[in-house]
């Protein structure tokens, strides 16, 4: 495909769907960098966004559109809604996606491209693993925390290299990973520990320091690693122990996306996280009783607040 006029000029049109912690940080950071034309797609109009970045707090002008009928295809769409809300973003994707659009799917789980396929038409899908912690403090205020050596991980593709260039000038640091599939599962391992524990206990990540919680999380991780190996993820034999050690280094005062959703009375994305382990386990005939129990509890909680 020939490049769009915006690509030739170097200034791209970028739309961010969702203004939660992840999307608010992405939209605010890109707007603050000022290299591209950024709009955000949300439920309520805003004119400005305060973004607490790792080294500074900034207030940036931000165009927020509330009606899919007011937008046209763009160069980049950053889809940052929860995985279970992809369908509700379908009208935005249909309006924003054209043959030259790439959708950076900044969601949890392991099936990014399949998730947007019914809505994105001819647009390309780029799976993105998000590591940074984004917290929504208010409708117009978000906070970013670095969690690991990179803020997002990408496959080694031309689209990923273009996305890394899009992020230039922002504090969101990308890495192109040859072991991207393994990283997808490594991120899923983190998510089946941090998200359920914080949501069910209504505590931030300091709860992971409890010895009894660590016994439970070790069991969840060992089941999931067995499933990942059957899926061909190529994880090391120490993956469960490595993940357990890693999550214990996370800031004690940081929340998780599921924690904030539970507190706000929003549906939980248990199906895309713990559910992915349970479904893959069933496919391979690998028992996952601990994850299945966790999925039952999370589904019950989600149904109760929905």
Image: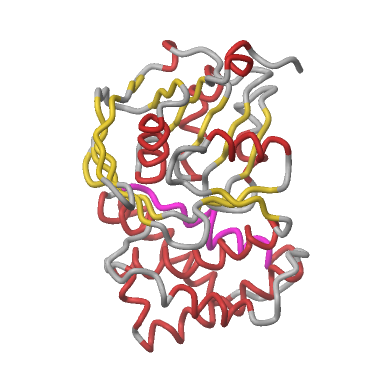
Kindly give the residue lying farthest to the left in the view shown.
Answer: 138
Could you say which quadrant of the image residue 285 lies in? bottom right
Q: State the scheme by which the image is colored.
A: secondary structure
The range drawn in magenta is: 266-281
What residue is at 46 percent from the left and 52 percent from the top?
Answer: 269
Residue 91 sits above or below residue 281 on the image: above
| Residue 29 appears left or right of 186 | left
Residue 224 locus on image (x, y percent): 62, 72
| Residue 67 appears left or right of 182 | left
Q: Is residue 272 magenta?
A: yes
Q: How many marks?
A: 0
What residue is at 24 percent from the left and 34 percent from the top?
Answer: 59
Residue 128 locus on image (x, y percent): 58, 46
Camera-side residue: 47 or 223? 47
| Residue 128 appears left or right of 19 | right
The quadrant of the image that shows the N terminus is top right
Q: Is residue 196 magenta?
A: no
Camera-side residue: 180 or 222? 180
Residue 35 sits above or below residue 53 on the image: above
Residue 302 locus on image (x, y percent): 38, 54
Camera-side residue: 36 or 231? 36
Camera-side residue: 28 or 299? 28
> Which SS does the magenta portion mostly show?
helix
Residue 225 locus on image (x, y percent): 65, 74
What residue is at 63 percent from the left and 48 percent from the top?
Answer: 154
Residue 10 sits above or below residue 239 on the image: above
What residue is at 27 percent from the left and 26 percent from the top?
Answer: 44
């Amino acid at each position: 495909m020939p490049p769009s006029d915006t690509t030739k000029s170097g200034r791209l049109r970028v739309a961010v769907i969702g203004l939660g912690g992840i999307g608010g940080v992405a939209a605010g950071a890109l707007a603050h960098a000022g290299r591209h034309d950024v709009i955000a797609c949300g439920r309520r109009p805003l004119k400005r966004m305060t973004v607490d970045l790792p080294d500074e707090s900034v207030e940036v002008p931000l165009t927020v559109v509330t009606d899919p009928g007011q937008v046209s295809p763009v160069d980049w769409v950053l889809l940052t809604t929860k995985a279970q809300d992809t369908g509700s973003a379908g009208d935005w994707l249909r309006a924003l996606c054209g043959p030259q659009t790439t959708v950076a799917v900044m969601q949890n789980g392991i099936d990014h491209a399949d998730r947007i396929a019914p809505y994105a038409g001819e647009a390309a899908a780029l799976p993105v693993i998000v590591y940074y912690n984004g917290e929504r403090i208010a409708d117009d205020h978000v906070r970013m925390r670095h969690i690991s050596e990179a803020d997002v991980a990408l496959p080694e593709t031309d689209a990923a290299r273009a996305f890394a260039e899009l992020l230039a000038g922002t504090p969101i640091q990308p890495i192109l990973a040859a072991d991207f599939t393994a990283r997808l599962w490594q991120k899923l391992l983190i998510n089946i520990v941090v998200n359920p524990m914080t949501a069910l206990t209504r505590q931030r990540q300091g709860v992971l320091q409890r010895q009894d919680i660590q016994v439970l999380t070790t069991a969840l991780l060992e089941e999931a690693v067995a499933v990942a190996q059957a899926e061909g993820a190529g994880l090391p034999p120490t993956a469960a122990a490595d993940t357990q050690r890693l999550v214990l280094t996370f800031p004690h005062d940081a929340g998780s996306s599921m924690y904030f959703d539970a507190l706000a009375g929003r549906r939980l994305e248990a199906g895309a996280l713990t559910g992915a382990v349970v479904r893959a386990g069933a496919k391979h005939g690998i028992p996952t009783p601990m994850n299945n129990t966790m999925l039952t509890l999370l589904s019950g909680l989600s149904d109760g607040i929905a």
